[in-house]
Amino acid sequence: MFFSGLTLDVDATYVVVLALLLIPFVILNGLVFKPFLAVFDERHERVEGALARADKKIEEAEAKAKAFEAKIKTATQKGIEARSAIRGAAQAAVNARVEGERGKLDRKVEAALAEIDATQGAALASVDAEARRLAEVTAAKLLGRGI
């Protein structure tokens, strides 16, 4: 053998040493190790439970954020539609008012043109009469007699 000079005698001291090692281990296992492992496992479960609850809360918050964004999109669309309706109504009112004013102006222009035509006719008649009178006066002065 490789260790031919080593001899091992098993006697009662080995049993006593083994008992001195095992008895404190069994006592410490019951008093220290098992409670420590139980506390450690409980702490681990609490941490894992807290992480699971945190993940669940994050998922709920994300779902609520998506729902809120959907509501914002809906409200924005309704606002745009309301603004468009108000803008359309205002544009229709402006167009109606412009058409009303355009009608009034057309009537005023027609009245002014009729007045101009009447005044033009009177002015032409007056100019014609004045031209005849001036022609007669000029002819009488040039010819020395009345026409």
Image (spheres, grey):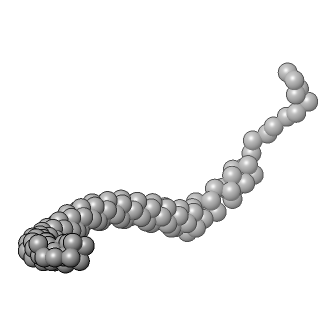
The location of residue 33, given as percent across then percent down, is 57, 63
Along the viewing direction, whichever of 72 and 79 lies nearer the viewer? 79
Q: Determine the residue located farthest toward the front in the rendered image.
A: 144
Quadrant housing the C terminus: bottom left
In the rendered image, which quarter is residue 16 located in? bottom right
How many marks the image carries: the answer is: 0
Horizontal placement of 72 versus 46: left or right? Answer: left
Horizontal placement of 48 versus 57: left or right? Answer: right
The location of residue 120, given as percent across then percent down, is 13, 72
- Residue at x 31% of width, y 62% of height: 69
- Residue at x 79% of width, y 39% of height: 9
Q: Is residue 139 visible?
A: yes
Quadrant housing the N terminus: top right
Along the viewing direction, whichever of 13 and 91 lies nearer the viewer? 91
Q: Is residue 138 visible?
A: no
Q: Determine the residue located farthest toward the top in the rendered image.
A: 1
- Residue at x 13% of width, y 76% of height: 146
Along the viewing direction, whichever of 105 and 26 lies nearer the viewer? 105
Horizontal placement of 144 versus 50: left or right? Answer: left
Along the viewing direction, whichever of 137 and 102 lies nearer the viewer? 137
Q: Is residue 51 above or below residue 141?
A: above
Q: Is residue 50 above or below residue 104?
A: above
